[in-house]
Image (cartoon, rainbow, N blue to C red):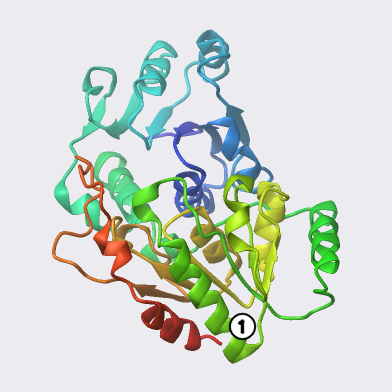
Amino acid sequence: MKLERIFVCKQGGIGDVVLLTPLLASLKKKYPHIKISLMTFPNAVDAVKGLPFIDEIFSYDKKNDNIWKYIYKIWKYDAALLFDLQYRPAILAFLAGIPIRIGIQHKRGLWLTHSVPWELSMDHRYEPYVFADMLGKKLGIELPQTELDTLYFAKPTQADEQVVATLFAEHGLTGNQPYVTCSPITAFHLKDWPPDYWRQLFQKVYDQYKLPVVIFGSAENGHLWNFPGAINVCGKTTLLQAASIIQHATLLINSCSLPIHIAAAFGTPCVALYGYSDYKRWAPKKNCVVVSANLPCSPCDGYVGSRCQDAQCMQQITVDDVFVACSKFL
């Protein structure tokens, strides 16, 4: 089978796109001549822009972009690898005359040539391994699992680094002074640890180790983090500036969301809180300690989804449990 141009699509959260990067890097290493074109939502472009194993990025906004423009761009590509559950990319690949179209079946099997039925085990395996299995089973392309444990993220620019340095200086944090960091509120409430627990943890870290806690994220929740020992930059950073904060931190402490994957990409130690979502599928494979209450009902965020509205799995993680995990790094 001769493959020279591959259309790859991953539309979803930014963290989902970052989890695709090891597969693309490994694929490019194995077949350096292949052109890889990645389609994703506009919010994820900065996360992967400039990565050497991605030749072209399509920033697709379904509300504003004309689908025919992209059909022209990928016309008669050799294969389409569709690593999400969206209808539109599958139809786009079909209309572009791409002869090999691989993806999770979902309800779009009509548009795929190599349809992969979802299996329960996929909910409990590291996401890059699931992607690699799809290539192995449908194209016979075997990628080393050891290469799939390393994530990649775009490098912050010098200007980004300067913005962060200025923000830190405003709070008295200068030079190479160590700090821990956290983005406490995620994009989905069932993954969140109670704010009061976070405050107690930050205070314990500051009292025990004299380490300030740099808190970033949405400005909407910034008012929750104004207390001694906290450096609150909520609403003041871009994606790459937040990445810079994580890159240079002594430790990231976070529940399941994008910052954990950024930490993995830069090799920053991480303490990760899991309950609703499965750490076996989402947590970094290196330099990460997972904390979970291990309730019988969790995790419950799989392919079918959950009706849970009361995340006891997160609320029953204790401050002491997380602090002990942090102490392993601090």
| Residue depicted at 31% across the width and 40% down the height | 139
| Residue depicted at 49% across the width and 54% down the height | 185
Q: Nearer the viewer, residue 103 or 260?
A: 260
Q: Is 30 left or right of 294, judged from the image as shown?
A: right
Image height check: is 251 above or below 11? below
Q: How many marks?
A: 1
Amino acid type for the residue under numbered disc 1: Tyr
Q: Position of residue 206 (x, y in %)?
A: 61, 83
Q: Position of residue 133 (x, y in %)?
A: 28, 50
Q: Nearer the viewer, residue 204 or 253?
A: 204
Q: Is 222 left or right of 289, judged from the image as shown?
A: right
Image quarter (top left, top right, bottom left or bottom right) of the N terminus = top left
Q: Secondary structure at mark 1?
A: helix
Give the residue pinned by disc 1. Answer: 206
Residue 55 location, quadrant: top right
Q: Is 224 left or right of 132, judged from the image as shown?
A: right
Image height check: is 30 above or below 290? above
| Residue depicted at 28% across the width and 23% down the height | 112
**Residue 142 appears in the rendering:** no
> Callout 1 environment at 10 Å: few (<14), some (14 to 19), or many (20+)?
some
Image quarter (top left, top right, bottom left or bottom right) of the C terminus = bottom right
| Residue depicted at 84% across the width and 77% down the height | 175
Q: Position of residue 159 (x, y in %)?
A: 85, 52
Residue with the most extreme bottom position: 208
Q: Position of residue 120 (x, y in %)?
A: 15, 49
**Residue 212 appears in the rendering:** yes
